[in-house]
Image (cartoon, helix red, strand yellow):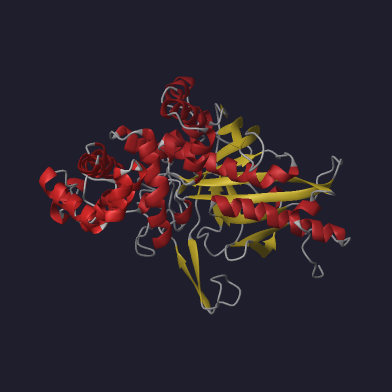
Amino acid sequence: MSRVTLVPFAEALTRYEPVMGLEVHVELGTATKMFCGCPTEFGAEPNTQVCPVCLGLPGALPVVNAKAVESAMRIGLALNCEIAEWSRFARKNYFYPDMPKNFQTSQYDEPIAHDGWIDVEVAPEEGEVQTFRIEIERAHMEEDTGKSLHVGGATGRIHGADHSLLDYNRAGIPLIEIVTRPIEVPGELAPLVARAYVNQLRDLMVALGVSDARMDQGSLRADVNLSLKPSGSSVLGTRSETKNVNSFRSVERAVRYEVSRHAAILDAGEKVVQETRHFHESDGSTSAGREKSDAEDYRYFPEPDLAPVAPSREWVEELRGTLPEPPVERRKRLQDEWGFSDLDMRDTLGAGALELVAATIEAGAAPQAARKWWLGELARRAKESGAALADLPVTPEQVAGVQALVDEGRVNDKLARQVLDGVLAGEGTPEEVVVARGLEVVSDDGALGAAVDAAIAANPDVAEKIRGGKVQAAGALIGAVMKEMKGQADAGRVRELILERLS
């Protein structure tokens, strides 16, 4: 393909309609791997969590992880899928360095769950919230691959690297791959729908308790398939597959970029290559990986070392009874209970603060106060430190404790921020920080009266205005007292004392 200039996203939509397919891989939070007893702890030393089974050594026989099967069924039920009465594993054959067996144990035409759906809500910058139903083709069980580390070069990719290292700790970890049917929505909303879908899947996995679904650690990864068709046509175009996209924002950016890239290729009269693509976080672009194989190229055949999985209907119904409240319904219920506006809730979700706010309210804080701390002061701290909001060294219980001090009048908002400083610095609970730093508000009339008298004496012109009936001028004296007492004066009582003296 010759080099082409990208077509702006909005312009591309005047001639083409995007069609998406999303494949989301979820690492299950089981204690051991899919087919062996090796641990699954994240971050262990390379190649220390392996055995003959997950390394594919001759003579090693796999055994299915029952907990992984249970998690797969609960995921399928939560996605409104049919749970198969009989399913089996297959060998997906292809050579890749991080596949120690040179095949992946997966499911092909007989998955554990199939024919489901999930509704996702999209909130454009302008206009009302819209709901789209995403159809699920299947959710199947498989094992994860190992991990390649490309050393040398500027990008961390294999291109330009001096050599590569392989860590097989991840090989064999249980995966559920959730595959959609083709998604056709208004073109301008396609990136937002893709982002909302992956976001909602993550929320669902966390609610089910089957995975921590941390995209930054690779326990939830999305493959974005995209093609373009001429406006009004029913003929699907050739698709590309952007692999292992690991953030909600990147899912949205990958869709936008591929729409622009495909449009440029088609406008030039050339053909889109069916291939995998690498996503680049630095600029939101993609680059070619390898030509994408079709299913027949993988030479699927039934796994001879594993028995079929045939869950009883009683087991299925028992698991159905364990499902939590669907995330969308829960969000609507919480919004009503908390009295949040649509914008309040949208901002809370966008900041990734829903569970933090919910836990803070559960610990005793008022809804708006909980939201204020997490979306204001703490969000600022997270941005400054480059940390995720949930990774800040402060708990919802501690945030509720800070707000309780405010509610009791023991600290004001300015002092409360200093209390948070201490908590974040590891100085103890909010109560301990207040005591250790001496941050409690001063409400003693003796101390306040002396400061008020000093402020009046130092600002006779302001005092005269107040005597003349301009009560609003008291703000200047209150500010002087607060400055003198380093923000620890009870502002309400200071105002009362000023007016008493000057009325």
371 over 42 or under it: above or below: above
Q: Residue furthest right?
A: 269
Q: Residue at x 53, y 32 (%)?
A: 76
In depth, the one of 278 and 447 nearer the eye is 447
| Residue 192 drawn at (x, y percent) | 64, 44
Quarter-wise, where is residue 108 in the image? Answer: top right
232 over 481 or under it: above or below: above
State how many labels appear.
0
In depth, the one of 22 and 51 nearer the eye is 22
In depth, the one of 485 and 172 nearer the eye is 485
Q: Quadrant of the C terminus?
A: top left
| Residue 85 drawn at (x, y percent) | 55, 26
| Residue 379 drawn at (x, y percent) | 41, 51
Q: Residue furthest left?
A: 446
| Residue 188 drawn at (x, y percent) | 72, 45
Is 85 situated left or right of 263 in this image?
A: left
Q: Residue at x 30, y 47 (%)?
A: 413
Is 397 situated left or right of 74 in this image?
A: left
124 over 264 or under it: above or below: above
Q: Residue at x 84, y 43 (%)?
A: 235
Q: From where the camera sits, is residue 403 visible?
A: yes
Q: Quadrant of the N terminus?
A: bottom right
In depth, the one of 93 and 254 nearer the eye is 254
Q: From where the camera sits, is residue 110 visible?
A: no
Q: Residue at x 70, y 39 (%)?
A: 183
